[in-house]
Amino acid sequence: MEWLRSLVLPPQGSAYASQVDGLYMFLIWLSLFFFLLIAGLAIYSAIRWRHKPGDVTPHISHNTTLEVTWTIIPLFLVIMIFFWGFKGYLAASVPPGDATEIQITAQKWNWTFEYPDGNRAINELHIPLGKPVKFIMSSQDVIHDFFVPDMRVKHDILPNRYTEVWFTPTVPGKHHVECAEYCGKGHSDMAATIYVDTPKDYDKWLETGGVDPNMPLPQMGALLYQTKGCATCHSIDGTRGTGPSWRGVYGSSQPLSDGTSVMADDNYIRESILVPGAKVVKGYDNVMPVFQGLLRDREVNALIAYIKTLK
Ligand code: CUA
């Protein structure tokens, strides 16, 4: 039955995914069984006792044995399903004491992950294989929802309070994170990637931050444009988005909301990335997160180099 499971459910990436899937597949088979039974009996009865000319329907009141049977059996089935689900819910709610704690901040429209050592990353999370990870989540603005299908984890993230989820990753490689609560225009772009690393890859990532040190700056900037969430608000083709398009911005004069204007040079772009509220372009609201402390210097340089190429 594995083929059916893999047809309707994503790959199993966490230790308790198989538990969740066991219950889910039971529900599917149970539904299928009762669908066939009830539809089959209905079709059979319609043919077998089809009305013929001259027939008179006899007076039928009830059948106690039948009614008690079709009440008691489903009752025990749903009680069993409750305890099965409750067991899984408890397992998913109580993290082990030695879990690594990672802070998640959700914000329109990106994810910030903060490690215990203070390192932060946007839309990209590296975790070691086979070690439990606990996420402590909060939102900067509206309700978002941390959804990692492979891990069978889905939990709302609320402003002004913390929620938690945890899992133990069991499959190395990429796993997608989606936002599962409609949070505005960029909702469908609010995605992140979890990389489950083998111990060797994890150590390497801790050293380099995952970026090839030999990649040319403009190329690295183009990559960061996608991975750091810039693309959700800034177009590169001149289209107006939540923020100004990057096309042709370098070296141009930008009118600001306070009536003055500024030359978009390296320093202005750097400031606008690290402290977006400092000089806001006229006609736009500043909703961009502060990237100070979130980007390495070389990453800021790469973004500036990339913007220069967008003429
Ligand atoms: Cu965040 Cu939808």
Image (cartoon, rainbow, N blue to C red):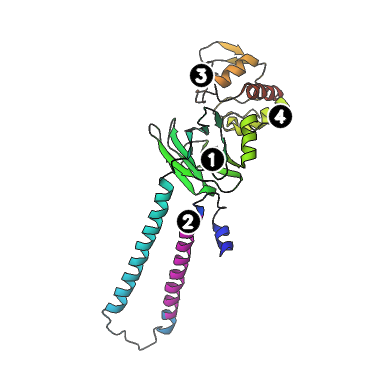
Amino acid at the residue labelled 1: Ser
Residue at 44%, 74% in the rendered image: 37
Amino acid at the residue labelled 4: Gln
Q: CA distance from mark 1 to mark 2?
A: 29 Å
| Label 4 packing within 10 angstroms: few (<14), some (14-19), many (20+) | some
Q: Which mark is residue 277?
A: 3
Choose top left, top right, bottom left or bottom right for residue 244.
top right
Foreground: disc 3 or disc 2: 2
Q: CA distance from mark 3 to mark 2?
A: 47 Å
The percent position of residue 163, horizontal first and vertical second, equals 41, 38
Foreground: disc 4 or disc 1: 4
Q: Does the rendering let one see residue 211?
A: yes
Earlier-in-chain disc, 3 versus 2:
2
Q: Which residue is mark 4?
A: 219
On whether residue 45 falls in the magenta region, the answer is no
Task: Provide the secondary structure element on which disc 1 rests.
Answer: helix
Q: CA distance from mark 4 to mark 1?
A: 25 Å
Q: Which mark is residue 19?
A: 2
Q: Does the rendering let one see residue 63?
A: no
Region of the chain picked out in magenta, as a range: 18-44
**Most common SS among magenta residues:** helix
